[in-house]
Amino acid sequence: MSYSMAGGAHLPPRGSSGNHKKAVIITAVLLSLGVAAALGVVVSGAIYSIVRTADELDETRATSAAASAAESLRSQMAGTVRDNAFWDEAYRQLGSPTRDAWLIENWGFSTLDHPLYDMALVIGPDDKPLLHYRHGKAMRVQPGEFFDSSLARIVERARAADGLQGDVHAEFIGTVHGPAVIGAARIRPFIQGIPPPNPYILIFEKDLDAKTINETARKFNLRGLQLTDSRVDSTVAVPIRDVDGSTVGFLSLPSEKSGARSYERVRLLIFGAAAILLLLIIGIGMIGLLSVRSLAKEEARARRSSLHDHLTGVLNRPGLSEYVENLASDVSSSAMIGLCLVDIDGFKAINDLWGQTIGDQLLGAVAARLTKDLPVGTTISRLDGDEFAIVSVDAAGKVAHLQSAVSEAFAEPFTIGRREIEISVSVGVTEAVLSRANFHNLLRQAEMALHQAKHGSAGVTVVFHPDFEAELSEQAKLEQQLIDALDRRELKVAFQPVVDAGNGDLCGVEALARWNSKTGPIAPDIFIPLAERAGLIGILGSQILEEAIVQGSHWPGLQIAVNVSPVQLRNRYFAGGLKATLDKFAFEPHRLTIELTEGVLISDADQAKRSISEIKALGIKVALDDFGSGFASIGSLRQFRFDRVKLDKSLVANIEHDAKAAAVLDATVKLVNALGVPVTVEGIENRYQADFARDAGSHQLQGYWFSKPLSKEELNERFLRRDRLREFRVGGYDTVAR
Ligand code: C2E
Ligand code: CA
Ligand code: CA
């Protein structure tokens, strides 16, 4: 069954149970994302590092290749100079008259097409060039004008030669035609001896032109080797320095960038992998998002169901509480909130009569009717059992309308299956300024009003009044006093005699609780229901029982009757407690009678039945009290097999003036007797009533005419001393003429 709510109470999602799950999912997703992202970073880092390392390796290789090319140019020049300068013939020619011709013949002309030098220069001790040929022709410019200033240093070093291996100097040098390699050495005999005093220096020069560079490149297999003035982008350049350390040019090789090239080749694959990783990350994120979403939905569903009553579909108590609390924080301050507590009169009887299924259907129908009939802006909820709460908010403060709307809703009977069920409701109403409303306070006030409504007849509506609070606090005070009194065992027992209808003999006493509080005596009709409501009836009952049994032990042969409230009988351990008390005082079970009112038959009949059989099984007698005052039927008399029935005093009152009442008493006594159950008539206040009851067939009589309830001392005094018993008979019953 499901019913929509009038006005549609909207409840914001909130929850703590799902928060844990959510945190787990979010953590898992973040962890996966973190791992995936870290993986991406590590892999791309590795790729970058591989590319870098490969490129760096290339550069190192290229640098060293260029450097060795430069070195080979130099060492080649050194070798050429060595071969020519350390030459016996050349040395000899220096001192000969054919010297100049020889120099031109051997070195000058060879500059025309010599593969290893373009210029030959021989300098004498006075720095004058003896030979200065380039490309097969005598040079007209001075060597100092052709070469840069580092020439002087080379000549100087060549002159300083001491005849050891390092006597040949090959260097790079700047010339008017650009960078060149130059070699210089003293001309001397091939076999080294003491250096001659006047040094002549042989100098070869080779242009580092395109042809030379290309040849070198071919020789070293260095594709793209170039001589440049400055560093060129995307090349690896090695500076070419002269003897002074000044850069005269750069030998450069195109940078291989094999790492970058490999990267270019696998780039698509890497992009593919990255895309897959990205997809994975997005996938994980999506899954996480969906999980959290569905969790939130599930949570909202669970929350919704936890705030609604399953039977009727309207809000339940926590749902209403939250709804009201949300309202109170939302709405403008002048608005009023009204709360109606509706309790179906006699719902228990309906349940007992038609069965629980019908009862449930009726509750559903009530919820549906209220939802349909009550105005928009009204929220229905079922608090528990047959109790409904209706909340309405009115900016104009006219919540009073709610009351009449609720009463009207129950005017028509309910149709459940083929049954028409007419019900009345008791209603407690309260209202408050919404902005200051507190749900529990409102509910408490409405409950107080409902409590008052239920006190009277059915179908009553009571509006909360502040006096109720005082009443309630009075009750609370009284409850505390009762607790204290029980603590101090201040409750006393009065014993009311029960006499044999035949001979007037005292045959038993009924134990009745008495409370003499500090403020005076309080009637059992006040404190017994109070004890029942406050959960104190168990303690109270056992104190009275103990006292009655202790006294009863002093009165051998006398029946002791003790009143037991239905609330006590609902306790599964009641019979066990009873037995323990009997054992403790060694009291014969058959001398004890438990008096039960019919209330026990109505509420929780099953447990009552179990307790009654347990009590009977102990040998204790069970009497039905106050028969004739309520609903108890002949059927229940049979069903529970009571040992005695006590007719209610209301059946006796007035029989002397009311023939019909007398006939009812007479018939009732006969009826119970016919069922084989002995009868006690209580409330006998005069001789006529006593005679009538006895003549009708009552076995035992009880009432003020015989005796009011007495203290144990009074009872000892007046009845239990043998000589006084006669007095009782005379004063009471025995002398009555039959
Ligand atoms: P009850 O069990 O029907 O007890 C009989 C009540 O009728 C007693 O009132 C008694 O004083 C009163 N009564 C006796 N003879 C007459 C008479 O001739 N005329 C009139 N008008 N009344 C008479 P009491 O003591 O005020 O007790 C009221 C009720 O409180 C009892 O009704 C019983 O239901 C309950 N009660 C008393 N003591 C206990 C107890 O220890 N445990 C429980 N659970 N209930 C108790
Ligand atoms: Ca009684
Ligand atoms: Ca009674």
Image (tube, helix red, strand yellow):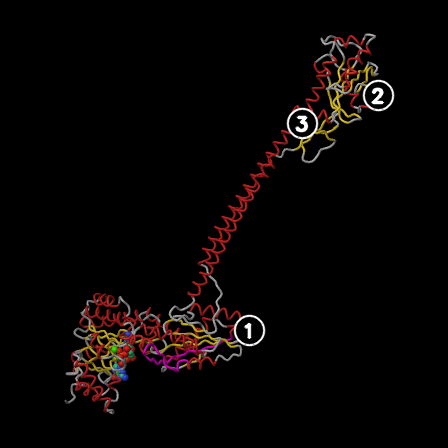
The answer to whether residue 709 is seen in the rendering is no
Q: Amino acid at mark 1?
A: Ser
Q: Which residue is mark 1?
A: 332
Disc 1 crowd, CA 10 A, few/some/many (<14, 14-19, 20+): few
Label 2 secondary element: loop
> Is residue 381 magenta-colored?
no
Q: Where residue 607 sits in the image (x, y, percent)?
A: 26, 69
Instruction: Please tell me which of labels 2 and 1 falls first in the chain.
Output: 2
User: Can you tell which of label 2 and label 1 is closer to the viewer?
Assistant: 2
In the image, ligand 2 is in what quadrant? bottom left
Which numbered dot is residue 142? 2
Please say if 691 is above or below 122.
below
The answer to whether residue 336 is seen in the rendering is yes
Where is the N terminus found, in terms of image quarters? bottom left
Q: Amino acid at mark 3?
A: Ala
Q: Which residue is mark 3?
A: 66
Q: Quadrant of residue 120 in the image?
A: top right
Please say if 34 is above or below 245.
below
